[in-house]
Image: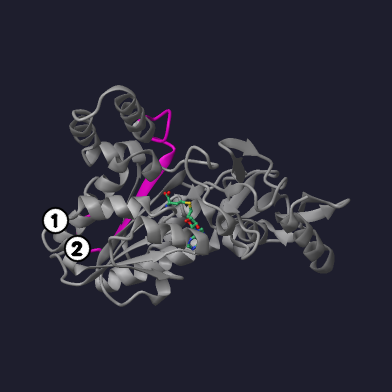
Amino acid sequence: MTALADLLLRRIRAGGPLSIADYMADCLLHPEHGYYTTRDPFGVRGDFITAPEISQMFGELLGLCLARAWQDQGAPAAFVLAEIGPGRGTLMADVLRATRAVPGFHAAAGVVLIEASPSLRACQKATLAPYPVQWADSIDVLVEKPLFLLANEVFDALPIRQFQRHAEGWQERLVGDCGGRLAFGLSAPTRMAALEHRLADTAPGDIVETCAPAQAIVAGLAARIDCHGGAALLIDYGDWRSRGDTLQALRRHAFADPLADPGKADLTAHVDFEALAEAAAPCAVAGPVPQGVLLERLGITARARALAGRMTGAALTAHVAAHRRLTHPAEMGQLFKALALHPRGAPPPPGF
Ligand code: SAH
């Protein structure tokens, strides 16, 4: 049993079952035993690979997309260029390299990374050593300026709660102690105002998920972008409206039991883009657009050809596979989607 499993079981015995959100939050970010706090999970040797780790093209195109949105809003002379959950810092490094040639963009940008894990902050510092970069704990402390922001595969790591439909309302799925092992259980049924609208499209036994932290972050972003200008590109896997249990654990590129080894596996859930779009008022929302469609519209095929011209052998084969992996509907192209927030008076960022 992991040290975190032991700790969670003791907490459950003392205070009763945990919500899945409480369980997820500790598994991912517990100061001593959390998954992101204790390791670098990315890459072939890690547990999963994200789009910026697959190819530099991802960050280059999103960087130019943000730079174009900045130009479309009159190229404000001072703005915040931010990323939430930057992982190894690869995406921001690609963004900064690709936008070097955009006149005035770097001079106007103050780069801020919002990262919860100290070990990943250190990793980002090494990757982004050539650039002046600051770190923040949350978007709430950013300076009051136009905000151009990216978040890739971050909202899927935010803690969700699950509710199972019952004839009398909803039962929350909880994590409890079953004979000394962590096990799922259900709360007593209650009516829930926040899920009243889901009574129409669910039947008893169906599960829906909510993610209050994701909605709070989007509401905060939207208030800033509406007030000061800017844009946010939120990319993740998920769909329009939460349906069913999507909590999953990944360890060494394979699915695992989410309760088996708390703190040792990545835990995620699909992002509900409908809930994010609803939280984005008063901003305008564009998308969600499938990742493959967005990258094609931003010119990934032309960029892939240009890069391929300088490659041969195994590097070329890997490059062609990376292009396909990012864009093909059977790979990341359809499951992953991008949502853009922008001011009501400004055009949506290119590609949306
Ligand atoms: N965007 C990166 C990493 C995705 S993994 C990429 O595409 O490769 C999720 C990232 O979000 C990690 O850096 C993790 O530490 C961070 N994270 C998780 N929860 C967070 C939170 N509540 N606030 C800020 N960062 C968070």
Residue at the image point whose x is 44% and y is 51% from the top = 273
Residue 36, placed above or below residue 205:
below
Residue 215 in the image: state x and y as whole percent: 48, 62
Is residue 309 something one can see in this rendering?
yes
Q: Amino acid at mark 2?
A: His
Residue 138, placed above or below residue 234:
below
Asked whether, in this view, residue 277 is left or right of residue 66, the answer is right
Residue 109's image quarter? bottom left
Q: Nearer the viewer, residue 193 or 45?
A: 45
**Circle 1 sits in a helix, a strand or a loop, which is it?**
loop
Residue 6 in the image: state x and y as whole percent: 78, 58
Q: Are marks 2 and 1 in contact (CB under 8 Å)?
A: yes
Callout 2 crowding tier (Cα within 10 Å): few <14, some 14–19, many ≥20 = some
Q: Main secondary structure of the magenta part?
A: loop
Residue at the image point whose x is 70% and y is 45% from the top = 204
In this figure, which residue is indicated by the disc labeled 2?
106
Residue 252 in the image: state x and y as whole percent: 58, 38
In this figure, which residue is indicated by the disc labeled 1?
102
Q: Nearer the viewer, residue 324 or 307?
A: 307
As drawn, the label of residue 42 is none
Asked whether, in this view, residue 42 is left or right of residue 341, the answer is right
Residue 280, placed above or below residue 262:
below
- Residue situated furthest right in the rendering: 179
Residue 23 in the image: state x and y as whole percent: 67, 58
Q: Which residues are magenta?
A: 328-348
Residue 251, placed above or below residue 64:
above
Residue at the image point whose x is 60% and y is 49% from the top = 208
Residue at the image point whose x is 17% and y is 67% from the top = 107
Residue 102 in the magenta stretch? The answer is: no
**Circle 2 sits in a helix, a strand or a loop, which is it?**
helix
